Every structure is written in structure tokens, then in C-alpha cells.
Amino acid sequence: MKVPLWRVAFARSGDKGDTVNVGLIAFTTSLYPVLTELVTADKVKQHFKGICRGSVDRYELPNLCALNFLLHESLGGGGTVSLMLDAQGKTFSAALLRMEVDVAEDLVREADEVSGWSERLE
């Protein structure tokens, strides 16, 4: 079933200069291989089209069931030199969690139980 990433993972983000760091952590160990397959550097680059002007690097952290992305050239030069109103990477995690992926329904139900979404979505 097609779901936004917030149904199966949580994320944190920050920045250093003009590079944004986004960590994506699967709610369950069984979801990690699915996220590894579906959330590629190319797909993240496409998701942030028009915002991320540089390359996207992906690092796998299997012991944490996490993926870490570096989005280069994404903040108009960074907080101190950018003309952007809020040139910081703290909002990129919420933006990534809006990306939709196809995940087996049983894995989504398992994630809903772990995350507490099952009670909130009823």
C-alpha cells in the first residue's frame, strides 16, 4: 500500500553550512530493508527537486535500522550568507516524511502498532 514515510519511520535533521543532514529511522527492524530499497539517494534528490541543488549522499546504518542522507547545496549558502528567510535544515525531516512509498500492508500495520498510530488512525 502507498503510505507517507511518517507511517513507517521517523526522522531528524540538521545542517552544517549549506549541507542538510537527514536521518531516517525505521519503526521496526523488518521495515529497514524495505526503506533501504525504496528510499534511495536519487529518490530523495527528486523529492527535494528545486531545493537541493547539489548531490545527495546516502549512508546505511543497519545496526540502528537507519539511513542518513546528506543533501549538498540545499540552503542557499547556509544560515549566515543565505537570503532565505530561515536557511536551516531543521524542517527537512518533516519534508522527507511526506515522501510516499509502497510498503506491504502487514508491515504498515506492524509499524502502526509500534508507533502508536493504530489508535490515532481509528
Image (spheres, helix red, strand yellow):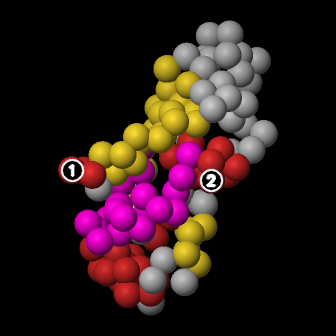
Residue at left 56%, top 25%? 19
Residue 85 can be seen in this image? no
Image spot of residue 93 (x, y percent): 51, 46
Q: Residues within 10 Å of mark 2 (few under 14, many from 20)?
A: few
Q: Quadrant of the N terminus?
A: bottom right
Quarter of the figure with the C terminus:
bottom left
Identify the amino acid type marked 1: Asn
| Residue 48 x/y as whole percent | 68, 45
Q: Is residue 72 above or below residue 120?
A: above
Q: Residues within 10 Å of mark 1 (few under 14, many from 20)?
A: few
Q: Quadrant of residue 99?
A: bottom right
Q: In this picture, is 80 found above or below 63?
A: above
Instruction: Kindly identify the amino acid type of the residue bearing the numbered disc 2.
Output: Lys
User: Separation of disc 1 and disc 2 at Cα?
Assistant: 23 Å
**SS category of the residue bearing label 2:** helix
Element class at badge 1: helix
Foreground: 87 or 28?
28
Q: Is residue 4 inside the magenta stretch? A: no
Is 108 left, or right, of 115 in this rendering?
right
Left or right, 95 with reference to 63: right
On the picture, is 12 further left or further right than 53? left
* Residue at image location 76% in from the left, 18% down from the top: 83
The residue tagged 1 is 63
Q: Position of residue 112 (x, y in %)?
A: 36, 78
Instruction: Give the residue drawn at x 67%, y 51%.
Output: 47
Q: Do the numbered discs 1 and 2 sit on residues whose CB atoms are within 8 Å?
A: no
| Part of the protein shown in magenta | 23-41
Residue 43's tag is 2
Q: Residue at x 70, y 49 (%)?
A: 46
User: Could you tell me if residue 39 is visible in this image?
Assistant: yes
40 in the magenta segment: yes
